[in-house]
Image (tube, helix red, strand yellow):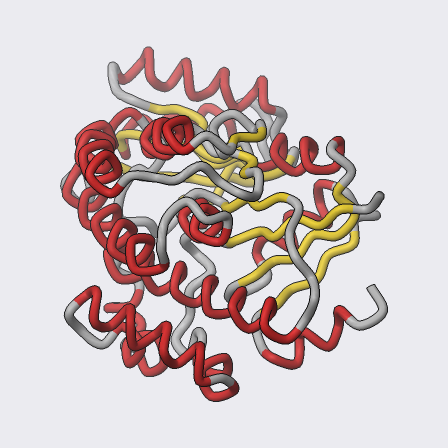
Amino acid sequence: MAKTAFLFPGQGAQAVGMGQVLAEADGGVRELIQEADRVLGFSLGSLMFEGPADKLNLTENTQPALVTTALAACHLLMERSKLRPDYVAGHSLGEYAAISVAGGFSFADAVRLVRLRGQAMQEAVPVGVGGMAAMLNMSQEDVEAVCRDAAQESGQVCVPANFNTSAQIVISGHQEAVNRAVALAKERGAKRCVPLAVSAPFHSPLMEPAAKRMDEALKETGIKDLNIPLIANVTASEVTDGNEVRRLLVEQITGAVRWEASIHQLLTLGVDLFVEVGTGRVLSGMMKRIDRKARVVTINAPEDIDKLEGI
């Protein structure tokens, strides 16, 4: 029997205006955004709808904005259609939205936790000390080799951080070491390596201070056993046990996001329809690179739900 997976995007999908058409279409969405405002103590909704972009792009604001928009879109989707997920997955930050949909914690807890997560990640490493780069059309083995060699040469941290697709692997670590890895890749024939405009070296060992803070916060919050299996970033495997979900969320702060492997696992489990819920089409684009035959629907606006008719 065909199955459905809901996918939730991570950082990089944000844009001024996010969530506005959802709020204009539904009172329940407006109530969710107002709840986020209360939880955070400032008007997240105004920042999402009106910007400014530089403030929205601060990771402590970006993270709750993306989770709020994703959960608002999911609310509308489940209110206006009969579609329900058999599995959930989220790219990095998106795991928090996925876990909330699966019953692990409340909307309010999700928003509060990712606000803290953004603050903790930004404070873990001073701005300018760390960096990230996208290595395009390089094999996993070649990327791992340049990271290893750059780390050895510099005595600093440089690791693969996001295995997004076979043609896109992101690396992270000290800026000097990342720069050296990019140089080594070009020396070895890489056609394109793109430095990323990020404020911290996410998914690297440099994020250990943030992992410790999130471990404490997640213990205090608690996570219920999930009623929908999550495909976890760091293992690309199913998990429903609340304690294990908490452990993997902490590990995810410093560990690599195994997104391509997660999608392959969902395909193996019989998923026939992938629904990207939230803002942007980043994950839908990745899906087409991972499996061109996969059925993918993106839910960013009320009219997108009409695409589900007949599916």
Q: Is residue 7 above or below residue 65?
A: above
Residue farthest to the bottom, as pictured: 24
Q: Is residue 174 left or right of residue 226?
A: left
Say which of 277 and 209 sits in front: 277
Q: Is residue 248 left or right of residue 221?
A: right
Say which of 196 and 25 sits in front: 25
Indicate the quadrant where residue 176 lies: top left
Q: Residue at image x 64%, y 52%? A: 85
Is residue 219 visible to us here? Answer: yes
Q: Is residue 111 above or below residue 214?
A: below
Indicate the quadrant where residue 270 lies: top right
Q: Is residue 184 above or below residue 297?
A: above
Q: Residue at image x 23%, y 32%? A: 215
Q: Is residue 206 above or below residue 284?
A: above
Which quadrant holds the C terminus? Answer: bottom right
Q: Residue at image x 29%, y 77%? A: 34
| Residue 84, image x, y percentages | 65, 57
Say which of 70 and 86 sits in front: 86
| Residue 92, image x, y percentages | 43, 43
Which quadrant holds the N terminus? Answer: top right
Residue farthest to the top, as pictured: 152
Q: Residue at image x 62%, y 30%? A: 261
How many numbered marks have been drawn onto this rendered protein structure?
A: 0
